[in-house]
Image: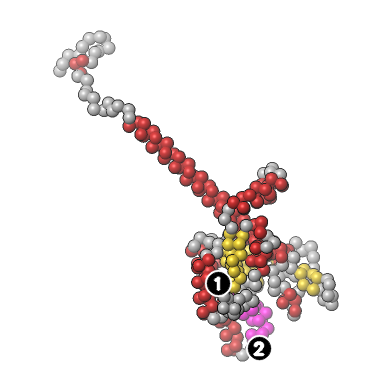
Amino acid sequence: MVGQLMALGVSATHARDRVSSMRSTRAAATFAEVYGGGTIVECANKARRNLNLKGLHALDLRTMKDDGTPWNFTLRADRKLARELLDKDDPDWLVGSPPCTAFSIWNYAMNYPKMDRDKVHRAIDEGKTHLNFVVSLYRKQMLKGKYFLHEHPAPALSWKEDTVLALIRSPLVHTVVADQCMYGLTTPAEGSTSERLPALKPTRFMTNSVSMRDQLSLKCDKSHIHQPLVGGRCRDAAFYPLQLVEAILQGMALTADHDAKILASVMGCRAMEEERIDTISAVTKAASTIPNVDDEKPVPVSSVKKVTGGVLPIA
Ligand SMILES: [Zn+2]
């Protein structure tokens, strides 16, 4: 938004002040991470407090429930508890990144053929349980007029699952692929403990916010060489780089700014409409005090003078 104002000729300082004051006057947009370790929540609540966002929860195997045990969404009881918590706190955004291993093309091509068939089915069923859980949460967000952001690797086969495809078919839902190298993703270089090289890691996002989609649309500019994500590098690249976290937060803030503008515009229109109704009412009231001449008796024709000055004869 700062850039848009500057394009309109507003100085950088004034543009930043304008956006900052707008953000400080709107209510903080709230969000929860589901399967996120809490990086986005932590960044919003500390480093990027100026965006006026509030991270409420990070529900993940690495975070704890009130009873001190970690969230485990393979358990129906934990899914139910999370639903109740989210219903109660009603966040404006849900950010979901369920486990993607079960849908990995690598597993389908290399590992599943060598594994016990029952074990493969169990792994896929578990993956689907997690996926269907977050999709049901996203649907609820949409029904409430709120937002979601879902992430999985671009090549993952989860994008072809019926539940996901049904959501994608909605005209309100958008998908976009971000190349994480453009958001600062790097992994250690071969044989080096200090050097790091960019990793492409194309990641597909699905969201019902255009502002969020636009923040996550950077593609590799081919200005560097990528390091393939094999072996331990997969693990190193399993966390969002800071720039990606910031882009996600920016997407939430821009969405909230946009909604606040629309609300102000609607409120302005409503105020104008109320003013118009008041004016009409005042005019009507004033008009009602003018003597009513409608019930005057008709003037006898015989008394109407002809233009010639004579009197019309009575028929
Ligand atoms: Zn790149």
**Residue 266 at x, y percent in the picture:** 50, 48
Query: Upstream in the sequence, badge 1 or badge 2?
Result: 2
Residue 151, disc: none
In the displayed image of the protein, which residue is found farthest to the front? 67
Q: Is residue 305 visible?
A: yes
Frontmost of labels 1 and 2 is 1
**Residue 229 at x, y percent in the picture:** 74, 75
Q: Amino acid at mark 2?
A: Lys
**Residue 164 at x, y percent in the picture:** 55, 71
> Residue placed at 76% from the left, 74% from the top?
228
**Residue 199 at x, y percent in the picture:** 75, 70
Q: Is residue 15 above or below residue 104?
A: above
Q: Is residue 246 visible?
A: no
In the displayed image of the protein, which residue is found farthest to the bottom? 116
Q: Residues within 10 Å of mark 2 (few under 14, many from 20)?
A: few
> Residue placed at 71% from the left, 44% from the top?
11
Q: Is residue 173 above or below residue 80?
A: above
Image quadrant occupied by the C terminus: top left
Residue 134, disc: 1
Q: Secondary structure at mark 1?
A: helix
Q: Amino acid at mark 1?
A: Val
The answer to whether residue 229 is magenta is: no
Q: Residues within 10 Å of mark 1 (few under 14, many from 20)?
A: many
Numbered range of the magenta stretch: 98-114
- Give the residue pinned by disc 2: 114
Q: Is residue 286 above or below residue 160?
A: above
Q: Is residue 119 above or below residue 144?
A: below
The colour scheme of the drawn protein is secondary structure
